[in-house]
Structure formats: structure tokens, C-alpha cells
Image (spheres, rainbow, N blue to C red):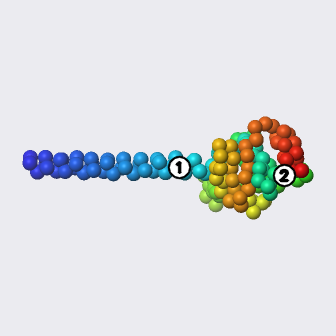
Amino acid sequence: MKKTLVTLLAAVSLMGGFATVATGCSNNSTQQAEQHSAKKITKSEIKNQVYTGVSKDNKDEYITFFTGKDKKTVQFVRVSKNGSKKVITDFKKAKIVMNKDNAKKFKIDGFRIIKEPDFNWKFTKVGKTTIKTSDGKQWKLYEGSHKDAVKSVQKNGK
């Protein structure tokens, strides 16, 4: 009986020790996650938004991020004041779809081609509504329609 009680107490004290360690780790990772999300911007945060260029070298451009009708297709377009558009896409993870009836028949889905390979997806937040790409260009969130954004870009780019 004593042996069982000692084993039980040891197990409880060990569990308590693990709980303390786990709590310490989770608090630390939560703080890191909050700090991380404050500095970086995710693709889901920029969907359906228009950002106009505010740096000296990109005042004549805007980037628009919008989702397609299926709410899955996301297209990113960089537009210059002269009206030329560059469609920016990114790689999606390849997905293999197996045929249940015939294992020899399968489909590979999910490939996308990068049409503008020089575009860098690493955005950082500079202000509440301003993002910055790794090449130093800054983009400000534009409140308004796409047509208004084009007019604004054309005006600022002159």
C-alpha cells in the first residue's frame, strides 16, 4: 500500500512539474506569436485589399489583392500608371488526387506559375495601414474602389 501511495504521489508531483513547464512554454510562445504577427503581414490579411505605392520609386504603382468567385483563387496584380498590368502569382503546394477505382489513374493539382519572379512576398508592417516589401518599397492601404485607386496612382505618379 505504501509503495502504491509513493508511486501515486511521485506521479502527481511529476505531472505538476510538467504543467508548470508547459505553462511557461505556452506563455512564451503566445508572446512571440503576438509580436510576430504585429511585424509581419499574412496573405489572408491582404486579400481583397488595394495598396498604392508611397515610396519615391513606386508612386506610380498599386498592388491589388483579390479573391476569385470561388473564394479560393487569389490573384495579385501590380498596375503602373500607364495602365500596364503584371499578374503576380505564387506557388501553391502540389496536391495529388488519387482515383479510388483505379490506382494507376491520379491527378496532380495545385501548381501555379510565377509570372513575376522578382516580386517578394515578405511583407512587414511599417504602420497601421502601410506595408513594406523587402526591396524597400512601401505600399499604403487604399480606402476606395479600384477605379479610384488607378486615378490616385496616376495623379501621384506624375
Spatial separation of the CA atoms under disc 1 and disc 2: 32 Å
Q: Nearer the viewer, residue 141 or 147?
A: 141
Report the side of 150 relative to 16 (left or right).
right
Q: Name the residue under label 1.
A: 35
Residue 137: x and y in percent read 73, 56
Task: Determine the residue positioned at 71% across, 58% down.
Answer: 136
Q: Nearer the viewer, residue 112 or 131?
A: 131
Please tell me in which quadrant of the rendered image residue 106 appears.
bottom right
In front here: 120 or 54?
A: 54
Label 2 residue SS? loop
Classify 10 Å Cα crowding around label 2: few (below 14), some (14-19), many (20 and above). Answer: many
Viewer-proximal residue among 46 and 55: 55
Please give the name of the residue rendered at 72% of the width and 52% of the height, measured from the top-left corner: 138
Q: Which residue is drawn at 41% across and 47% down?
A: 27
Residue 146 in the image: x percent, y percent? 82, 40
Q: Where is residue 45 in the image (x, y as percent from the top left)?
A: 65, 44
Whether pointer 1 and pointer 2 mark residues with C-beta atoms closer than 8 Å, the reply is no
Tag 1, which secondary structure?
A: helix
Farthest bottom residue?
118
> Which of the two discs, 1 and 2, labels the residue nearer the N terminus?
1
Kind of residue at badge 2? Asp
Q: Which residue does the image show at 53% across and 49% down from the upper left?
A: 35
Q: Which residue sits furthest left?
A: 2
According to the picture, the residue beneath numbered tag 2 turns out to be 60
The percent position of residue 7, horizontal first and vertical second, equals: 16, 50
